[in-house]
């Protein structure tokens, strides 16, 4: 009888594992899923929307970003590119070189709140400070000029 009990217990455990496997969504972020997520994040800037579109949750995306330095670096690069596209669109609009409407006030607010973290780690602390200072100074100057241009008569504000 002992053998029959073991067989029944093994079959029950196997069935329970199969049920758990079917009810638990896959949590693996394959290379294809990651690439599609980053493509969607670049377009929308919305983590939840991009994650949902690839069958994942925003929580799992943030968790992977905490665990994986390469995933976090790609995420930062995608958002940096998005900010740069926003800056370029804003400059084109302020200069009257496009028919695209950008809400100048909202764009400036987003650009002012842009994270300032460096993309790569320079070798010395002085170099980090110099690069961060120069970049911050250039960004402040660009924002100051864009604000001044947006106040001029005839400049479209996208509103």
Image (spheres, rainbow, N blue to C red):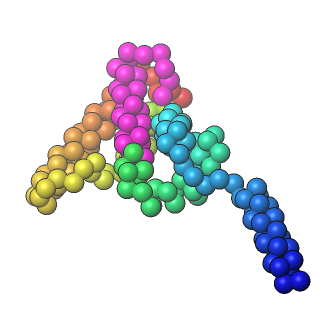
- 62 above or below 107? below
Residue stretch rendered in magenta on the structure: 75-102
Instruction: Please provide percent x and percent y for residue 30.
Output: 53, 45
Q: Is residue 83 magenta?
A: yes
Location of residue 27 in the rendering, given as x and y in whole percent from the top left corner: 61, 55
Visible in this render: residue 70? yes
Residue at position x 44%, y 33% from top? Answer: 104
Q: Is residue 149 left or right of residue 159?
A: left
Q: Which quadrant of the figure contains the C terminus?
A: top right
Q: Position of residue 14 (x, y in %)?
A: 77, 66
In reply to whether residue 85 is colored magenta, the answer given is: yes
Q: Is residue 136 left or right of residue 28?
A: left
Q: Nearer the viewer, residue 92 or 157?
A: 92
Name the residue: 24% across, 50% down.
120
- Residue at point 79%, 61% (across, down): 19
Name which residue lies at 21% across and 40% down: 138
Work out which residue is located at the far right of the displayed protein and give it.
Answer: 1
């Amino acid at each position: 009888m002992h053998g029959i009990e073991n067989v029944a217990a093994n079959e029950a455990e196997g069935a329970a594992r199969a049920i758990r496997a079917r009810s638990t969504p896959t949590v693996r972020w394959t290379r294809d899923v990651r690439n599609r997520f980053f493509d969607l994040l670049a377009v929308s800037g919305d983590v939840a929307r991009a994650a949902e579109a690839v069958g994942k949750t925003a929580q799992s995306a943030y968790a992977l970003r905490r665990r994986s330095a390469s995933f976090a670096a790609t995420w930062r690069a995608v958002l940096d590119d998005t900010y740069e596209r926003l800056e370029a669109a804003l400059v084109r609009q302020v200069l009257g070189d496009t028919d695209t409407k950008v809400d100048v006030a909202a764009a400036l607010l987003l650009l002012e709140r842009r994270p300032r973290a460096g993309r790569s780690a320079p070798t010395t602390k002085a170099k980090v400070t110099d690069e961060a200072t120069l970049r911050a100074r250039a960004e402040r100057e660009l924002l100051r000029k864009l604000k001044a241009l947006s106040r001029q008569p005839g400049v479209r504000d996208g509103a």
